Amino acid sequence: MGLLSEKVALVTGGSRGIGAAIVRKFAAEGANVAFTYRSSAEKALAIQKELEDMGVKAEAIQSDAADYGQAEALIKQVVENFGKIDILINNAGITKDTLMLRMNEEQWDQVIDVNLKSVFNLTKHALRPMLKNRSGSIINMSSVVGVFGNAGQANYAASKAGIIGFTKSIAKEVGSRSIRCNAIAPGFIETEMTEVLDDKTKEGFLTNIPLKRLGKGDEVANACVFLGSDMSTYVSGQVLSVCGALNT
């Protein structure tokens, strides 16, 4: 049996990058998985088929996590189709990088809405079924940038730092109902976004990473498995860095 056998997980932004690694890893560990995507239906449905071939129930759902009403409808749909939600992974995120003097209001608002407001939206609505079951694990995807900041990413850093404060507050609010809330702070991870970076930029990253390599999506997914499984039943309100000792 897998570490997540018979559990139901919902992953936002699960059709690419770290999110896709998470849904695949969760299915491999026996979880039934619902995941969201915003645009590429063909890619999302291909991942759904891949998960189903592993022998679990899976559903790709088009939904905008930054939209409060869509988030509410999403939670209702998952509970209706899967019967419950054991694990919520708030993974949806974007970047709109530029220096503060050049940053406009739209670039600020978009990043805050997708990265931070979405975490409020999904957590708000997922708590009701979790409170009813008196159990649940909420995992919020932050970033090492939310811990130490980064020039040209004030909007992104603010959103990811906000996630950390939100995580710790929710852990204190609902801990008495056996609901846990933790954050993961990835460092530089190999994704579609890092593939477009030039070698000089990548070398600059590696200079500051003690392990001297970029991380892999599976390594973040492994941390999610730990926080979603019964191995971490006394872990809540924490920030787990998966960064090759960058944040040390």
Image (cartoon, rainbow, N blue to C red):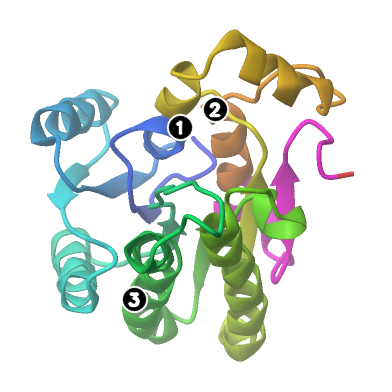
Rounded to the nearest angstrom, the CA distance separating label 2 from label 3 is 26 Å
Q: In this image, 143 relative to 246: left or right?
A: left
Q: Residue 208, labelled with which disc?
A: none
**Outermost residue, front side:** 101
**Outermost residue, left side:** 42
Q: Residue at x 53, y 56 (%)?
A: 156
Instruction: Residue 245: say if magenta.
Output: yes
Dot 3 lies on which element? helix
Q: Residues within 10 Å of mark 1 (few under 14, many from 20)?
A: many
Q: Amino acid at mark 3?
A: Asn
Dot 1 lies on which element? helix
Contact between marks 2 and 1 (CB within 8 A): the answer is yes
Closer-to-camera residue (167/160): 160
Q: Amino acid at mark 1?
A: Lys
Give the magenta part as a residue range.
Answer: 226-247
Q: Which of labels 2 and 1 is toward the front?
A: 2
The residue beneath circle 2 is 218
Where is residue 131 drawn, in percent x and y?
Answer: 43, 85
Quarter residue 39 falls in: top left
Rounded to the nearest angstrom, the CA distance separating label 3 from label 1 is 25 Å
Where is residue 126 drawn, in percent x and y?
Answer: 35, 75
Q: Residue at x 66, y 58 (%)?
A: 146
Instruction: Residue 201: say if magenta.
Output: no
Where is residue 139 drawn, in percent x and y?
Answer: 53, 59
Q: Is residue 95 above or below residue 20?
A: below
Closer-to-camera residue (46/154): 154
Q: Residue 25, labelled with which disc?
A: 1
The residue beneath circle 3 is 121
Question: Where, quadrant-wise, is the C terminus in this rendering?
Answer: top right
Closer-to-camera residue (68/46): 68
Q: Amino acid at mark 2?
A: Asp
